[in-house]
Every structure is written in structure tokens, then in C-alpha cells.
Amino acid sequence: ASFFDDVKVNLGGFIFSFNDLEHGILRANTRHPYQLTKPFSAMDLRKHLALQKLDPRVHFALNCGANSCPPVKKYTAEAIDEELRLSAMAFCEDENNVAIDEKNCQLQLSKILYWYQTDFVRSKDELPQKVAQYLRGKRKETLDKLTQQGNLSVKFLDYDWSSNNINTIVFEKGDLSDKSIFPYSRNPPPQKYDKGSRND
């Protein structure tokens, strides 16, 4: 988890960690499931950059490098709504993310929908109907039928945290000339990495 907090980038003069970008910007300054406070406080100058409304489909577009994450895709400002719609459908059509066990009347879902359940619905009981919005054809018909029967259970699948590193690029410390570690500063001074400055 330290990678997503400790590695920072300078965007327009503001410093962001990956968690800042995900939970502060893309999730409309919404609390991380395992943290007590929102990423940006009321006095944080970055708060005005956050989206005004949380779109839960963003979870079908974010990739942290694990095998169970959604695939990496390119998104555009002009067509973001349609692109997120397609990503949501593609993710939920994958049996590794959404599996329907008709015989045992069970819906098996990616752990993403457990961690971020409140981004999608108010309660676990509403998840089947929400997921059905992203399905089509026979799978949608089956899930709708099981939901209407009223005895559908929901199980969350194990998450595969192993690295999806097919196209990994390894960077040496000397390759990075600027270490942005100055939160909230609009003009952080450039610094060189000192190979002896950290205990890796």
C-alpha cells in the first residue's frame, strides 16, 4: 500500500499520490474503504479538482497491476461515458469477475464490489440488480430470474494479487531526476535521488 501513498507525481503544480488520484479525484473525494478520513480536507487546495459526482463505473477502469484488476485501456474526455459503459459490461461479462451459479442460486462477484459496495449500492441485497445493469443476453435473463425468485445469495470471489507484469519496465533510481515529495507545494524544487538516502 505504501507505493500508492509514497510515489507522487506533479500535475499542474499540485502533488498527488496514486491514492490521491483514485480516491480524491476520481472517486469525488470519497474515503478509502480502510481509512477514516477523506483524501482532501476542506482546506486542501486540491479539493476543487475532484469530480463532483462519484461514478462507480470508474472501478471497472482502474488497474493497480494485479491479475484480478480490470484491463488497462485508453479513455478520452469526449467519449468517457460510453467508454466506461463498455468497460463495465466487459468486466461483468467475464466469468472471473461475475459468475452466476443458477443451480445453487448464487451470484459470485469480484472483491472490488465488496470493497467499494457503497459506491454502487446502499446494501448488499441491491448488488444483483446493479450488476444486472451491466449484463446482457442470457446471463442478464438468468440473473433477473434468480433475483425475482428472492433467494439469491451473494459470494465474493478471492482476489488474485499476483502481478500482471507482462510489459513491466524496470526503472533504476538514477533514471528519475525529480523526486516530488513536497505535498501541497505548487513549485516543488527538483532533487536528485541519492542512492544512500533510503533504506529500501
Image (spheres, rainbow, N blue to C red):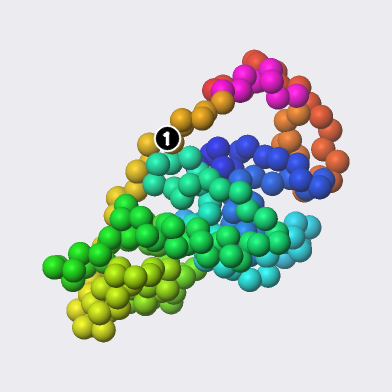
**Badge 1 density bin: few <14, some 14–19, many ≥20, Cα 10 Å:** few
Q: Residue at x 53, y 54 (%)?
A: 61
Q: How many marks?
A: 1
Does the image show residue 200? yes
| Highlighted range, magenta | 170-177
Image quarter in which the C terminus is found? top right
Image vertical order of residue 72 relative to residue 122, above or below: above
Q: Residue 23: image x %, image y %?
A: 59, 57
Front residue of 136/188: it is 136
Q: Which residue is mark 1?
A: 163
Q: Residue at x 76, y 63 (%)?
A: 48
Classified by dominant secondary structure, the portion drawn in magenta counts as loop
Q: Is residue 188 left or right of residue 199?
A: right
Membership of 171 in magenta stretch = yes
Membership of 128 in magenta stretch = no
Q: Residue 76: image x %, image y %?
A: 67, 55
Q: Is residue 14 left or right of residue 141?
A: right
**Within the image, what quadrant is residue 99 found in?**
bottom left
